[in-house]
């Protein structure tokens, strides 16, 4: 069964890291704000210093970090702090392509 194979491989190769967890932020945040971006980065750094977490740059899937890297790599770094461009590129370029795995993690309001 593929389920048995999955859990066998998971135990064999990933048991060192323990259980995956999701960290949800239910309130809306202005992710294009430098202050919010820095606060999230600081929180990830706190996790890295904890004995209960492994290096988040290697073990965590963080949509904001991946998106900011995407903006830089595609020559759109100016969009990191511009609300309209930030949301437009996020919704219409990042999520339908390389950020597809984050589609269910990000919720948009009715006005965008």
Image (cartoon, rainbow, N blue to C red):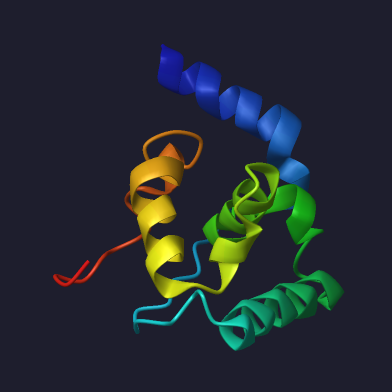
Where residue 78 appears, as percent x and y from the top left, is 61, 64
Q: Quadrant of residue 77?
A: bottom right
Vertical relation: 66 (above or below) 10: below
User: Could you say which is closer to the camera, residue 8 or residue 104?
Assistant: 104
Q: Quadrant of the N terminus?
A: top left
Q: Is residue 18 visible?
A: no
User: Could you say which is closer to the camera, residue 44 or residue 75?
Assistant: 75
Q: Quadrant of residue 65?
A: bottom right
Please count the marks in the image.
0
Q: Is residue 28 left or right of residue 59?
A: left
The residue located at (28%, 63%) in the rendering is 107
Where residue 99 appears, as percent x and y from the top left, is 48, 42
Where residue 30 appears, as percent x and y from the top left, is 44, 81
The residue located at (81%, 76%) in the rendering is 50
Where residue 18 appears, as percent x and y from the top left, is 68, 52
Residue at the farthest left position: 110
The residue located at (34%, 79%) in the rendering is 26
Q: Is residue 91 visible?
A: yes
Vertical relation: 39 (above or below) 89: below
Q: Is residue 6 left or right of residue 47?
A: left
User: Could you say which is closer to the camera, residue 57 or residue 47?
Assistant: 57
User: Could you say which is closer to the camera, residue 93 or residue 85?
Assistant: 85
Q: Quadrant of the C terminus?
A: bottom left
């Amino acid at each position: 069964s593929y389920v048995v194979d999955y859990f066998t491989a998971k135990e064999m190769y990933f048991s060192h890291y323990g259980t995956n967890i999701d960290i949800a932020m239910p309130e809306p945040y202005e992710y294009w704000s430098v202050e919010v971006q820095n606060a999230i980065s600081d929180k990830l750094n706190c996790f890295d210093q904890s004995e209960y977490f492994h290096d988040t740059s290697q073990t965590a899937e963080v949509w904001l970090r991946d998106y900011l890297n995407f903006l830089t790599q595609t020559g759109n770094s100016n969009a990191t702090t511009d609300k309209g461009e930030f949301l437009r590129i996020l919704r219409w370029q990042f999520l339908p392509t390389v950020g597809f795995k984050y589609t269910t993690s990000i919720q948009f309001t009715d006005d965008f």
